[in-house]
Amino acid sequence: SAVGKSELALELIIRGNRLIADDVTEFRRIAPDIVSGSCPPLLREFLEVRGLGILNIPAMFGDSATKRSKYLHLIVHLRRMKLQEIADMERLRGAGRYRNVLGVDIPEITVPVAPGRNLAILVETAVRNHILKLKGYDAAELFIERQQQAIEENST
């Protein structure tokens, strides 16, 4: 859908992340609350980048640049948006919801795509924020609590 997914994948690989699959991902439910994703053998290790063609990721970046499978913990939806649409988005909590995959509700966030936005940094940051939330830390909640505390202190 021309939002730069392959370029984003390439940038994330260069930043030390691993490729599981390019356009075709096979998902399996391997436990009541666990979905695992992998790439069909025919397509494994390849990434298609418009203008460059088919790239063999382990040949270019080493075997550690790919991984056979990974549990699905977060879905990142890339959505082309105008700057005004981005400005109108929820500011404290971001654009999050859940998507059902094989009977398991998986958290999903929307990352707005617009000229000048560094998608690799935004995706890595979204993943780190998700990990913090899994550990019980929610930056938006802390921010709201601090504001509420300041309001209460100033009203007395």
Image (cartoon, rainbow, N blue to C red):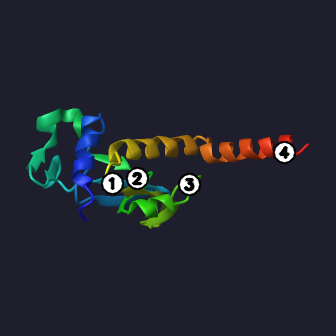
In 3D space, how far apart are the residues under numbered discs 2 and 4 (Cα atoms)? 41 Å
SS for dot 1: strand
Disc 1 marks which residue? 37
In 3D space, how far apart are the residues under numbered discs 1 and 2 (Cα atoms)? 6 Å
Q: Nearer the viewer, mark 2 or mark 4?
A: 4
**Residue 101: quadrant of the picture:** bottom left
Number of disc labels: 4
Residue 126 at x, y = what percent?
Answer: 45, 46
Rendered view: 58 above or below 42: above
What is the three-letter code of the residue carrying label 4?
Answer: Glu
Residue 152 numbered mark, or none = 4
Specify which label sits upstream in the sequence, 1 or 3: 1
SS for dot 4: helix
Residue 143 at x, y = what percent?
Answer: 66, 43
In 3D space, how far apart are the residues under numbered discs 1 and 3 (Cα atoms)? 31 Å
Specify which label sits upstream in the sequence, 2 or 4: 2
Disc 2 marks which residue? 72
The crowd level at tag 1 (other Cα within 10 Å; few <14, some 14-19, many 20+) is: some
Disc 3 marks which residue? 91
Specify which label sits upstream in the sequence, 2 or 3: 2
Rendered view: 59 above or below 1: above
What is the three-letter code of the residue carrying label 3?
Answer: Arg
The crowd level at tag 4 (other Cα within 10 Å; few <14, some 14-19, many 20+) is: few
Which residue appears at 67% of the width and 42% of the height? 142
